[in-house]
Amino acid sequence: MKYRVDRLRERIDKLASSARTPEGGVTRLSYTPAYHEGMGLVRGFMEEAGMKVRIDPLGNIFGRFDGNDESLPVVLTRSH
């Protein structure tokens, strides 16, 4: 897998800007508009990468890559 540092930095900045505080920090409290915006961004990043995405009842985002061999373990990442 090839990494693009510029794209990673751009996505981190975009995610941070959705919850920037006046002091320059980032606060994204659960279930606030900033939280939902951040969730949408992360979900979009995962879908753009080709992952199957699901969100559980607590709001955790799971992204999954299916492999070519179902007998092997999956690669799974989640929002937190």
Image: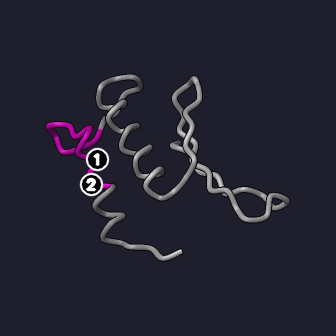
Name the residue beneath numbered marker 2: 13
Which amino acid does the dot numbered 2 rest on? Asp
Which residue bears the numbered disc 1?
16
- Residue 27, image x, y percentages: 31, 35
- Residue 24 included in the magenta stretch of the image: yes
Give the Cα distance between marks 1 and 2: 5 Å
Residue at 38% across / 73% down in the picture?
Answer: 4
Question: Residue 24's spot in the image, x, y percent?
Answer: 18, 45
Q: Residue lying at the far right in this picture: please name it.
A: 71
Between residues 11 and 27, which one lies in front from this camera angle? Answer: 11
Q: Decide: is 63 above or below 65.
A: above
User: 17 or 4, which is in the foreground?
Assistant: 4
Left or right, residue 7 beside residue 57? left
Indicate the quadrant where residue 58 lies.
top right
Quadrant of the rendering where the N terminus is positioned: bottom right
Proximity of marks 1 and 2: CB atoms separated by less than 8 Å: yes
Q: Residue at x 53, y 42 (%)?
A: 80
Q: Position of residue 63 (x, y in %)?
A: 57, 48
Residue at the (80%, 58%) spot, across then down: 70
Of residue 45 and residue 58, the one placed in the foreground of this image is: 45
Q: Amino acid at mark 1?
A: Ala
Q: How is the image coloured?
A: one colour
Q: Secondary structure at mark 1?
A: helix
Q: Mostly what secondary structure, the magenta segment?
A: loop
| Residue range of the region highlighted in magenta in the rendering | 12-26
